[in-house]
Amino acid sequence: MADSKDRSQTRGITVFLVVTLLTTALIWRGCWYGSPLSDTEIETYLEGGGDLGDIHKALNKIDERLVRGDSSVEKFFPLLVPLCEHEDANTRKAVAWVMSDAELHNPFRVHLLKLTRDPNILVRLQAALGLARHTHALGIRSENPSKEDMSQAASLGTASRDVLLTALDRIPIEAPSDGKISDMLRKGEPLITGMRLARIQSGDGSLHEVLSPLDGKVVRTEVTPNQVISRGDVILQVQPGDAIIRNALVGLYMVGKAEDAPIVRRLVDGHFEVSEETLDQARQTARRLENL
């Protein structure tokens, strides 16, 4: 009897796994970035004729062609601009990524500049990296840059630099509402974007979750469990993830100033625990800035 029950449970688990895998495969096939898209499909998706996955796939395809040097994708550029205002932060970040690769398309610079003031930190950082690339392109691809180009490069570089430097230090996480805080992560715990950092119970009994805006880890807690806090109070300090720090260092290599060298050098001296790859980039960036 026990054997029959065990076999029944095993069959049930097997069926569950098969259904789960098939469902995952179908979803993956529908959103897989490797499958081709026609120009008509790209245009349709960018104009809202699909879901978020379709939009991201269309953006990915544009970027792939852009990197290959396919100038025909420029016909889609006007459709990217409205997506800078999209309600989904990942979409705004993806648009900033594509605009970053269009280094010589001047009209994108004003939109990247605006995105450096986005409420989402990952969007700000991607836009700042994009501005760094545009600034670098202005400098190295113009044999005789005009005063206007030089002025624009300086302005873009400053805006980019200010944002990129924030990735080399702790990121304060503020409470989104008043209330009593609970279920807060501890120092040293790793983070993934969207992961719950804490809960806040408001005076009316409603619960609000505080979500991590980026990958990384908790490096300091500023409040204690069950403490009553106010909206805007800093509850945690977070170290950005390794890839975020490394990308910021790449951007600062292009637009950083000599006065930024000590900030970068802190990474080399162990300010944050980072990978050897990121440490090597920190050394390269520090040397370049120290020689300016």
Image (cartoon, helix red, strand yellow):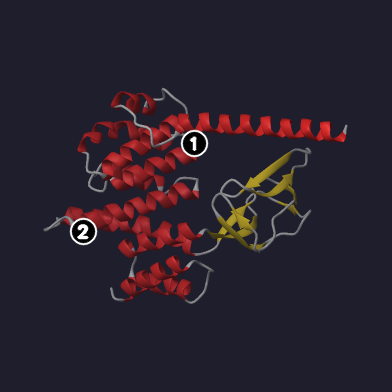
Q: Judge whether 205 appears above or below 37 on screen.
A: below
Instruction: Looking at this view, name the residue that lies furthest to the left.
Output: 144
Q: Which residue was labeled with disc 1?
A: 88
Q: Amino acid at mark 1?
A: Asp
Query: In x, y percent, where is residue 64?
Result: 31, 41
Q: Residue at x 37, y 38 (%)?
A: 60
Q: Position of residue 218 (x, y in %)?
A: 62, 60
Local SS, label 1:
loop
| Residue type at numbered disc 2 | Gly
Give the side of residue 194 with respect to residue 103, left or right.
right
Q: Quadrant of the C terminus?
A: bottom left
Q: Tell me where residue 102 appears, x and y as whole percent.
A: 27, 45
Residue 237 lies in what quarter of the image? Answer: bottom right
Write down the residue under mark 2.
Answer: 139
Check the image and report above or below for 59 versus 292: above
Q: Earlier in the sequence, mark 1 or mark 2?
A: 1
Instruction: Identify the residue shown where x is 39% and y is 26%.
Output: 45
